Amino acid sequence: MPQRTSRTALSQAGKLDEAPEFSTTVLDALRQPLESGRVTVSRALGAVTFPARFALVLAANRCPCARPATPKDPCVCAPAARRRYLARLSGPLLDRVDVKVSLFRSTRRELLADRRFIEPSRVVAERVLLARERAAKRFANTPWRCNAEMPARALHAEYRPPPAAMSPLLRHLDSGLLSARGLDRIIKLAWTLADLAGKDRPEPHETNSALGLWLGEER
């Protein structure tokens, strides 16, 4: 069957709001594009492969009713219903999601207090630009442009973090809480955190933070 590659990108970013409401077929179809950065459309006369590197944001409520549960107004969904709802986001799909964050309803006091810690967009943009420049300089003599494009062979060779930084990741890998794919994605994320912090290599702080983000334990 003939196969050709198109130079036209399908998308650069996308968001699925209420992600568990999509069919599992649609959600699982995202796994390969997220992994390879390509999507192949096959028909009787041939197959066409498109570049499909994109940032995907999945948003989901904790349960079908989507009510912000409080002691005075608890959620009405049964525990089994909550489990079934979130189980629509399969493990293999979540394995490919680098950052998982749980958000909770904020009080008025918390919202007002947070104003003291808000950074202007200009400050954040400058930090991101410097991080991108650090990565570009590091990859100047390679075919990669950013941390996300590093292959596994490079992650575990010249770009492998020091033993002290790898230690918490290997413990989770040995215990089964972390997959080999997850390990690679966490190392890439740790490199990005190091770039944002202006460091030459990820240290234990970066790998631990990346691990917490991948597991969904950071808030």
Image: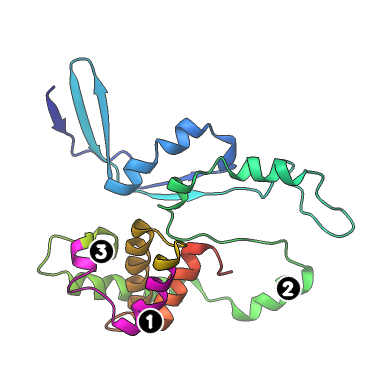
Q: Earlier in the sequence, mark 3 or mark 1?
A: 3
Report the residue that reaches farthest toward the top. Answer: 44
Q: Which quadrant: the N terminus?
A: top left
Report the residue that reaches farthest toward the left. Answer: 141
Name the residue that disc number 3 marks: 146
Report the residue that reaches farthest toward the right. Answer: 72
Of residues 198 and 191, the one nearer the viewer is 191
Name the quadrant containing residue 149.
Answer: bottom left
Type of residue at label 3? Cys
Name the residue that disc number 2 marks: 110
Identify which residue is drawn at 34% across, 77% down: 166
As for residue 143 lying within the magenta part, the answer is no
Identify which residue is drawn at 64% across, 40% down: 84
Q: Secondary structure at mark 2?
A: helix
On the picture, is 122 further left or further right than 114?
left
Residue 11 visible in rendering:
no
Query: Are dots 3 and 1 in contact, CB under 8 Å?
Result: no
On the picture, is 179 further left or further right than 6?
right
As for residue 169 lying within the magenta part, the answer is yes
Instruction: Name above or below for residue 29 compared with residue 173.
Output: above
Residue 197's mark?
1
On the picture, is 217 further left or further right than 9?
right
Identify which residue is drawn at 71% across, 78% down: 113
Q: CA distance from mark 1 to mark 2?
A: 27 Å
Type of residue at label 1? Ala
Q: Which quadrant: the C terminus?
A: bottom right
Q: CA distance from mark 3 to mark 1?
A: 16 Å
Instruction: Name above or below for residue 75 compared with residue 162.
Output: above
Q: Which residues are magenta?
A: 153-172
